[in-house]
Amino acid sequence: MSSRILPDFDLLLPKSLAEAVELLATHGQRITVMAGGTDVLVAMKFTQSPEYVMSLDGIPGLGYVVFDAAKGLRIGAKATIADLLAQPEVKQHYPALWHAAEIFATGQVRNTATVLGNLLRASPAGDCSCAIYAIGGKLILQRTDGRREVDIDDFWLSYGVTAREPDELAIELVLPPPAIGARSAFKRMTRTNDDLSKLNVAVQLEMLGNTCVEARFAMGCVAPTPLRLRNTEALLKGREITAELLARLVESVPSEISPIDDKRSTAEYRRQVSGVLLKRAIEEACSAA
Amino acid sequence: MKDAAITLHINGEEHKLNVAVNRTLLEVLRDQLGMTETKYGCGTGECGACTVLVDDRAINSCLALAATMDGKRITTAAGFAHFGELNHIQQAFNDEAAIQCGYCTPGMIVKTASLLAKNPDPTEHEIRHALEGNICRCTGYEKIVKAVQKAARTAPGRTVKADAACQEVAQ
Ligand SMILES: Cc1cc2nc3c(=O)[nH]c(=O)nc-3n(C[C@H](O)[C@H](O)[C@H](O)COP(=O)(O)OP(=O)(O)OC[C@H]3O[C@@H](n4cnc5c(N)ncnc54)[C@H](O)[C@@H]3O)c2cc1C
Ligand code: FES
Ligand code: FES
């Protein structure tokens, strides 16, 4: 049993972005970055004992969620799940992300947890991560000598590991502007309402009449990181959505995933329901338009 | 830094404190200030017993570092009483017998206050959704929902409306 008391550490409270990246340049790997802390503090109460914790609390101006029809949605590193839900444009243009945020944890956690923290945690179960993977987007990483963009497709490397270097701070996520005919949906399964997902899925479709011209499917809890279902996407792209085709998609999903047995579910169960959950998400995306 | 000098405005009173950086807001309230109305349930953000308002947002104080709260306005369940008089939310929990062991009650009161501030006339569904992060092992929630409905009806400045139950039937 853990005592659930935080270990000793040194707190870094930079007052500007410049100071924050300076600290990362100096201490790098020895720093654990903390945004909302809902993952970091829980991990520290059980196992982790970082030398430095760098809180983003004192850095001004990173709490924004801004929509622009031409540029897309920009989410700052300190924007919480609640901040996201407060933007009507998110519900209108990015329904999968809005839904993932709406069912996320509890009101108290949504007031604290950040959207970017969910991506940086690199958990295969992250709900916003799943929705964002289907929508597509870019993370902006800052260090002392400049910034770079990393496509979400290249961001998660393995369980808990991202493309972020130790001297970089993630400052913003940019989602593309909504395409014409775009629709999206998110679905998840849990043991109890407020538990982490045992399986989640998000779909983003671009439709031209009944024909699907673009498709991105993301599934969580079925691999070490959130997973794109690229083979299954290929089956749908350029085709009309019919009951027969959906049945083929359902069959295709289990061959793309590598779920495991854990306390939330079994590999066998996840394999069995994965295709059906994808199908329901596609149906929901189509019916919502 | 290992310690931080901070000022907290708790229930309208200013507190100048020196806190160890690895202390949660909950630990500082309870152990350093002796304000034990805010409860420790799980320490991991799941039960809501430690809920407080920080600048009007309900958060779990077990998952917040006190050292990062400098200058913040904190409201605990005790902060709603005025000179020993219970406010309408506290009174409603009493009147509806929505309290058994009472351990969850401070968190429930704080979360109810944040709900009613945003939504003065919530439906039963909205009440249950708002309280999803507050676990009660005793009451079965029925009486808690009734207490929140009563608190909504009895809020100061509100004209007395039809009983919430009647409204639901009417819809
Ligand atoms: C009770 C409870 C319920 C939860 N329910 C859900 C749920 O339903 N769905 C879900 O997906 N998750 C859930 N979580 C997990 C957690 O809340 C999310 O992963 C959340 O989005 C993390 O955000 P945060 O701001 O709290 O991150 P933090 O804990 O601050 O950080 C998370 C990780 O990201 C890194 N990081 C954060 N910001 C940056 C940055 N700007 N630059 C570089 N690195 C950074 C940190 O170093 C850390 O590794 C739950 C957690 C709790 C405690
Ligand atoms: S003690 Fe904070 S949520 Fe349980
Ligand atoms: S009254 Fe006992 S936990 Fe709610």
Image (spheres, coloured by chain):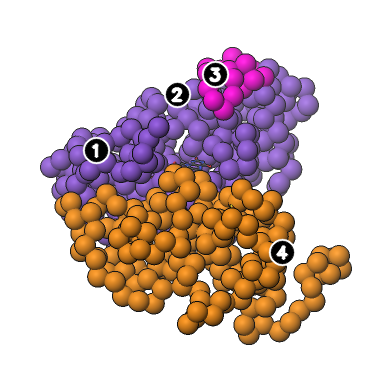
Chain colours: A purple, B orange
- Neighbor class of circle 2 (other Cα within 10 Å; few <14, some 14-19, many 20+) is many
The answer to whether marks 4 and 3 sit on the same chain is no
What type is the residue that disc 3 sits on?
Asp
Whole-percent x, y for residue B77 in the image:
49, 67
Residue extent of the magenta highlight: A252-272
In the displayed structure image, the side of residue B161 where residue A159 appears, left or right = left
Indicate which label's residue lies in the foreground, 4 or 3: 4
Whole-percent x, y for residue B46 in the image:
51, 46
In the image, B21 versus A38, the foreground residue is: B21
Residue A50: tell me if it is visible.
yes
Of the numbered discs 3 and 1, the one sitting upstream in the chain is: 1
- The chain under label 1 reads A
Indicate which label's residue lies in the foreground, 2 or 1: 1
- The chain under label 4 reads B
Based on the displayed image, in which of its 4 quarters is residue A198 positioned? top right
- The chain under label 2 reads A
Question: Circle 2 — which element?
Answer: loop
Whole-percent x, y for residue A29 in the image:
20, 35
Indicate which label's residue lies in the foreground, 4 or 2: 4
Q: Label 3 to label 1, Cα distance in Å?
A: 30 Å
Q: Which mark is residue A224?
A: 2
Image marks 3 and 2: residues in contact by CB distance under 8 Å? no
**Residue ID for mark 4:** B146
Of the numbered discs 3 and 2, the one sitting upstream in the chain is: 2
Task: Identify the residue at image location x=62%, y=34%.
Answer: A191
Whole-percent x, y for residue B17 in the image:
24, 66
**Residue ID for mark 1:** A50
**Residue ID for mark 3:** A261
Q: Label 4 to label 2, Cα distance in Å?
A: 44 Å
Question: Does the magenta run of residues contain A27?
Answer: no
Q: Label 4 to label 3, Cα distance in Å?
A: 41 Å
Question: Does the magenta run of residues contain A271?
Answer: yes
